[in-house]
Image: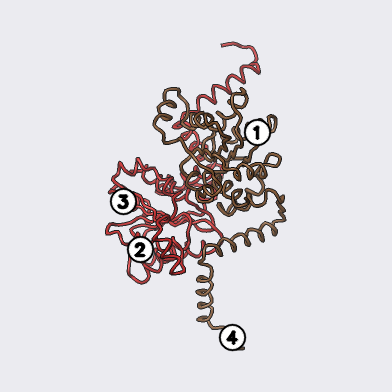
Chain colours: A red, B brown
Amino acid sequence: MTSKPISNERIEQNKTDHMEMILRPEEIEAESFRIIAAELSDMGITLPAETDPVIRRVIHTTADFSYAETMRFSENAVEVLRELLRNGARIVTDTQMALSGINKRKLADLGGEVHCFMSDPEVAAEAKKRGTTRAAVSMERAAAFPQPVIFVIGNAPTALLRLRDMIESGEYRPAFIIGVPVGFVNVEYAKECIMELGNAKTVPYIVNAGRKGGSNVAAAIVNAVMYMV
Amino acid sequence: MTSKPISNERIEQNKTDHMEMILRPEEIEAESFRIIAAELSDMGITLPAETDPVIRRVIHTTADFSYAETMRFSENAVEVLRELLRNGARIVTDTQMALSGINKRKLADLGGEVHCFMSDPEVAAEAKKRGTTRAAVSMERAAAFPQPVIFVIGNAPTALLRLRDMIESGEYRPAFIIGVPVGFVNVEYAKECIMELGNAKTVPYIVNAGRKGGSNVAAAIVNAVMYMV
């Protein structure tokens, strides 16, 4: 209500107000998604409506817009995953970090559970004996569940390769595979295997092509789809 | 020992041999670091000897070479952090994911501990009452430890801003700050505050400038320095 020029003090005050204004977690998140939407639009990227909330949450988790170009979804993947989660899914992760990142309150509300067998001493012993990875043995443990299992793989390409073998031989069919391991060895190959086989044998998947991914990305995908239920 | 051209079958066999050969976790890791070194060299990037193992492990965790350009270290940061970890440090994280990602066996070998107050119902209640974040209140809990504390912040810029306030007012001095929150709101500003104040008041830090970071990056930094002890 004044026509005087805004003082430095006033600018500082506004800054402070602004900082205080956006300390509330739900506002920080809303503002983050507004920024992501604006920058995607500036880049001329329009995401398909079905996969948009998943890709945006991965960008929110990583501050890395390259995911807008590299995420791959089997047909109706988000709808399939949403229905599994709505019905109280059993999730198996390949890292404690991915397990930690999944919103357990939301999962419990939906009647779901999450497991990780990587710290199980029996799994470690068996992997050592057979000269394979704990992740590969963990997949076999998960496959023993009588219920449908959503596999959430953020770290170990060998987990994906073991699933590939089990699907190919016909001994097991995962309900869903989130295949986003990160890394430089076996990672791209393992993801390609899951996409090829998923398309050929209709095992639904969400994969991030290339080297990038991680437990944080894996958890973000699960959370994004849970929040759509 | 044959001069016949290599058959497709042989190539497949070699592929299989190769796949089997690099299923051992320690070999996968060694090969990954070889690839990272080769690509950094191709990019003409030479990392300083002190910070090199930390930056490489972050690239290993993210498959994102941009960290080679954006990670910032206060003077002798790696040496300072290594000494703290060698002497059995108390670590406080701002996420369960960062806590999960830290190698607890190695930490215990060194006599250290890791804590995260984010799921503490009292912290949540106090944050709600005061209209601030759980992360900010968690920092105050951590500051109540009589021992030196290494702060490992992979998510919440408000954790860094609360530390900034405590340092600025002189009420508390962190032993070390790993400041790598990820995101779009407050994140770059909070990191700049920590670097400025760290330089002015000699609070040692490792920060990733810009938007990128995360709990996985935070844990990777801790692990990289622990492996140097």
* Same chain for the residues under marks 1 and 2 in the image: no
Residue underneath mark 1: B203
Residue A167 placement, left or right of A186: left
Q: Residue at x 42, y 23 (%)?
A: B129
Foreground mark, 1 or 3, reads 1
Depth check: give the residue in front, A93 or A80: A93
- Check the residue under mark 3 and report the chain it is in: A
Residue A38 in view (yes/no): no
Q: Amino acid at mark 3?
A: Ala
**Crowding at mark 3 (Cα within 10 Å: few <14, some 14-19, many 20+):** many
Foreground mark, 2 or 4, reads 4
Q: CA distance from mark 2 to mark 4?
A: 37 Å
Q: CA distance from mark 3 to mark 4?
A: 51 Å
Q: CA distance from mark 4 to mark 1?
A: 63 Å
Residue underneath mark 2: A202
Q: Which numbered marker is on residue B5? A: 4
Q: Amino acid at mark 2?
A: Thr
Q: Which numbered marker is on residue A34? A: none
Helix, strand, or loop for circle 2? loop
| Quadrant of residue A166 within the rendered picture | bottom left
